[in-house]
Image: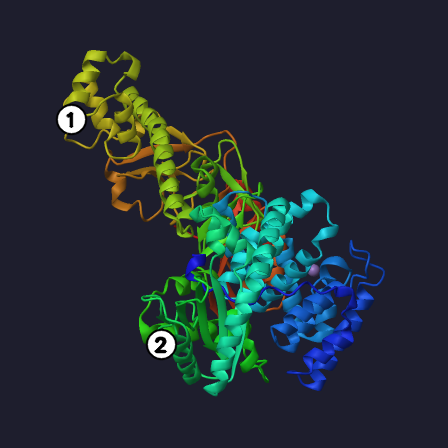
Amino acid sequence: MSSALPTVGAVAKPSTDSSRFLISDLCAELESYLEPQQIHEVYRAYLFGAEAHEGQTRQTGEPYIYHPLAVARTMGEMRMDHKAIVAAILHDVMEDTQTSKERILNEFGAEVAELVDGVSKLTHLQFRSKAEAQAENFRKMMLAITQDIRVILIKLADRLHNMRTLGVMRPDKRRRIAGETLEIYAPIAQRLGMNRVRRELERLGFAAKYPFRYAVLEEALQRARGHRREPMQKIEAAITQRMESAEIEARIFGREKGIYSIYRKMQEKRLPFREVMDVFALRIVVGDIDSCYRALGVVHNLYKPVPGRFKDYIAIPKSNGYQSLHTVLFGPHGSPIEVQIRSHEMDRVAQSGIAAHWQYKAGDDSAITAQTRAREWLKDVLEIQNNVGSSIEFLENVKVDLFPDEVYTFTPMGEIMVLPRGSTPVDFAYAVHSDIGNRCVAAKIDRQLAPLSVRLQSGQTVEIVTAKGARPNPAWLSFVVTGKARSGIRHCLKTLQADEAMVLGRRLMEKALSTLGQSLGQISPARLDEVLDAMKLPDIDALLVEIGLGNRMATLVARQLVGQEPADDEEECDSTGAVLAVKGTEGLVVNYGRCCHPIPGDPIIGLLSAGRGLVVHRENCRNVGEQRERADRTVALEWSNEPGAEFAVSVRAQTANRRGALAEMASVIADHGSNIEHISFNERDGHTTAMTFTLTVRGRRHLAQIIRSLRRLNDVLRVQRSKG
Ligand code: MN
């Protein structure tokens, strides 16, 4: 990837001693492109920040405020707008002092407050894993949680200054921060086209992570520079002179590859230092495109070009928008000379990438969000692309990074889980392991309990709470987005349903056999096999599942097992036999009718429906209707005496139209230990309101108590349980 990108920029300037850089220096620099009242705002932020950080010092011993000031300076060098500079000065006040977001909002407005908040959020993200793929995901996470791309730019400037002042840290800490810089921050700078920042981050990161290798390479570089100084100066002088006589205004820079790029090239291509370094390289920056081509003619006239090495990235820009003319010349000393020729504008874009976009579009822009700016930048790059139809790989990468379709979340152990946008804690749980998904009962997001259906955001840490014996809820299927969660839930429910169907099937079978004076134990194995063969079922369990699911009639199977012919008359009704008891906790194959809401104490009847098992209705439910007469489809039921589940029941009420009437009713219902699951208003006229509550109750007595208490209320005109 890196070789596809231009290596640009002169050797990084030696780092400036930040303690000598003052607010007055910053303001003086900002004068070149900001309005006086904007600079005044920056100064006000400085006073605010200095007061907030009062008494704090950095590890270097200098007052803390020098750090944010240095960060603001880098932002100024990128020519960022004044809000971004203000935010850079304040970037650590939320994190390191007691200053609240409200306070920043009141003092400096919402935009600055959001920027500072965004930087603080990134600071909280901890990169904990060593794995390569995790670093890639972490980079994406940083970009994904950032609403405003300026937050990333401040973070990069922050990291740059921390790297410049890394020397005072403990060696182990230094190496960790350096590794993070090389793996996370430098690639982000590269992704955003910010080559100058990338180069310095790489150099500082390399020096801190591999001090010995850096020292050896740096010394070799020094020596090479010494050898090359004289020939290089001669070449530069020759070119300068030719440019002058051709009347082209040009600035000529000697170039050197970044030390980290040299190191990587030696590693990747297994080349000795001498070979990597055996080229002269320089850049010629001119006023406009026309001059670029004229300058090319001049150098080709001076030294012979190497055939096949000329590239016109002005007419056909690189995929990240980079533009230049590249050529290689036969130098006077036998070493080739690599030359880049470009305009000031192209140079600026090549060095600053996305940040270059602020410079010439600054102005009164409060309506334009920085994300819009990011889009504009991408659009510009894309336009360049469309004109030439070259590779859009870089662009695709950046686009995915800035506007991802994925969310990046942490496990409590710090592993990164990448999920599709819109994923919920249930998707997360199944992504970790299907066992975790099947047994999950609750989720904690950033240590706070959260609903299982909530949509996850990038950067969140998600912890799944599991319970032994817990099972997936079919309702989850309505909100999960990953295929893994969907199939996991379905598979588990199917297995559970089969288990429960077998239990119910056995009960129905025993009941049917008992009306014939038999039991399962009394059926001979030979007879059982005969019947199973006829039904093409492998074993008794499969038969019981079929019965429990309602696909086969227990009464018919019982007669076959006993050896009776199926009776044609339907007179022999189930009610003569033993009665099945239900209590509401049976699970997936016993359902309670939503039409009539049966509750313990109600006379009930069971209807078998193919594939679903048993549905319990009140005896007078109109949906039972004519099916009541079909002995093969109905099962006589009664309520078990054991305490069971809570049941939903629906209650209609009519009240006077008075404020507070509903609240009074709700409080009476709550006093009885019942939950209101749903309220709907049926009709309303000037005086009265009719509504339907869905409540949870333990049984008929519980419901009767609630209705009695409701009737005592003054505003309540009528209350009754709804009919099925
Ligand atoms: Mn900082």
| Secondary structure category for the residue under label 1 | loop
**Camera sees residue 598:** yes
Residue ranking furthest to the bottom: 247
Depicted 113 relative to depicted 440: above or below: below
Q: Are marks 1 and 2 in contact (CB under 8 Å)?
A: no
In the foreground, 621 or 32? 32
The image shows residue 267 at horizontal and vertical percentages of 48, 46
In the foreground, 172 or 344? 344
Q: Is residue 347 left or right of residue 150?
A: left
Report the amino acid beneath label 1: Pro
Q: Is mark 1 within 8 Å of ligand 1?
A: no
Q: In this view, does 95 lie to the left or right of 233?
A: right
Depicted 429 relative to depicted 13: above or below: above
Depicted 291 relative to depicted 592: above or below: below
- Which residue occupies 42% across, 80% down? 298
The image shows residue 598 at horizontal and vertical percentages of 43, 43
Q: Tell me the quadrant of ligand 1.
A: bottom right
